[in-house]
Image (cartoon, rainbow, N blue to C red):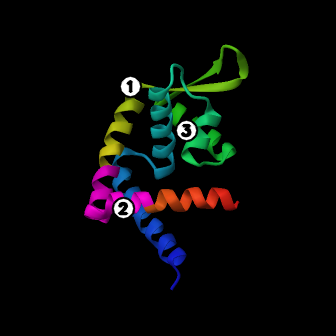
Amino acid sequence: MSPGFWLHHAALAWRQAFDRQLRPLGLTPTQFMLLASAGWLAAMSARPPTQQEVADHAGADRMMTSKVLQGLVDHGLVIRQPDPADGRVKRLRLTPAGQELVRRGIRIAVDLDEDMFGPDGDCMRETLERITAKARTVS
């Protein structure tokens, strides 16, 4: 069978396991990816990231991102504020509760990766990064 077939099934298995382990935190993998992306981008910049920057970093659809973020805002995990220079642009800031969930979710992700990929995790990551980069040039 093709490597793409196995890549697809491995991604599904990882996502299902991640979903099960995030469930006690009250998060889905998509919610976690958006929260973690917002936290990462904020840590790497002098100002909070825009909603579009978070969507791009997480590899998420812009409309879906907006809907998921609204739920995170409603649960007190994210604050969405207009950009002072352009009111159409929304900037995102994690609340302390959002930051804590990201910390806990990262620990879950690291443990899951170690469990599923073992000592080959670094090699796997490098291969997946190469595949992703190649796919971007082909598209």
Residue at the image position 60 percent from the left and 25 percent from the top: 91
**Viewer-nearest residue: 94 or 23:** 94
Residue at the image position 36 percent from the left and 61 percent from the top: 123
Gap in angstroms between the C-alphas marked 3 and 2 = 36 Å
Tell me the quadrant of the picture where the C terminus can be found: bottom right
- Secondary structure beneath disc 1? helix
**Viewer-nearest residue: 29 or 55:** 55
Q: Which residues are drawn in magenta?
A: 109-126
- Secondary structure beneath disc 2? helix
Mark 3 lies on residue: 71
Nearer mark to the viewer, of 1 and 2: 2
Q: Earlier in the sequence, mark 1 or mark 2?
A: 1
Mark 2 lies on residue: 123
Residue at the image position 31 percent from the left and 57 percent from the top: 112
Number of numbered labels in the structure image: 3
Percent x, y of residue 106: 35, 44
Q: Earlier in the sequence, mark 3 or mark 2?
A: 3
Q: Earlier in the sequence, mark 1 or mark 3?
A: 3
Residue at the image position 54 percent from the left and 20 percent from the top: 47
Numbered label attached to residue 96: 1
Gap in angstroms between the C-alphas marked 1 and 2 = 34 Å
